[in-house]
Image (cartoon, grey):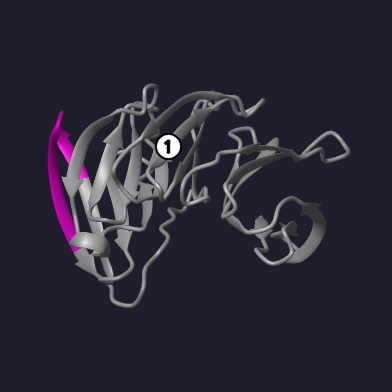
Amino acid sequence: AYVSSGSTGNVDVIDIKSNTKVDTIPLAPNIDRLRLSVKESRIYATTLDGRLWSAPLKGGKKVKAAIDLTNPWNNVNGGAIAPSGSDLYASSTAGYVWRLDPETLEIRASATIPWIVQDIAVSPDGSALWAAAENGAVLKLDPMTLAITAIIPVGFGYGGPFGLAISPDGQRVYAAASQSGTIYIVSEPTPNTFDVSSIFVGGDPRRIAFSA
């Protein structure tokens, strides 16, 4: 397991069998999201100072790399990996979305959209990039061009979704609206036709994860 510390900029490596810390990776300050490469050979971190960081997990000395994704709000908060491992994605609440080379961090595509983008996730078949827009929608994007292909309204105004995850079978998108204490479930029974249901959980739900 990998645990980030926003204050120290370190990522601690935890042995889940012994529940002990076995390594520390000095990575970057103000870490928001951590992501592992498909083969678990590299770790990525988005940071609140507008950067995307990368560090190898194997092969001896850990050499860091970073790209400055400058944007008006100067943050990079969302991160996702294509299931094939061929593309890395990042997003900013300023409405920026990027597709990058996971090895070199070279930008392959970028888009500016009029939404406050929080969490992002790629469908298990790689056919869509989904995004939680805090100002009231779940967005479906083309994973290559990053163009919006569907807007599914959920929540109201700035009470929209914050966290987002896709079910392992790819059939449902779950979005957590922290301000309303609600989980929205989006399905697409036929192409471009969406059903939305919701579960009120209360509190301040922010992140969603599925068991393997």
Query: In the drawing, does residue 89 fall left or right of residue 170?
Result: right
Apparent side of residue 197 relative to residue 34 in the rendered image (left or right):
left
The residue at the point 60 percent across, 25 percent down is: 106
Q: In which quarter of the image is residue 143?
A: top left
User: Is the residue 182 above or below the residue 131 in the image?
Assistant: below
Highlighted magenta segment, given as a residue range? 187-198
Measured as percent of width and height from the top left, residue 18 is found at 76, 64
* Magenta highlight on residue 26: no
Residue occupying image coordinates x 41% and y 51%: 93
Q: Name the residue under label 1.
A: 97
Q: Residue furthest front?
A: 72
Report crowding for label 1: few under 14, some 14 to 19, many 20 or more residues within 10 A (C-alpha): many
Type of residue at label 1? Val
Residue 208 position within the rendered picture, expressed as x and y whole percent measured from the top left: 41, 58
Report the label total: 1
Q: Which of 211 and 185 is in front in this view?
A: 185
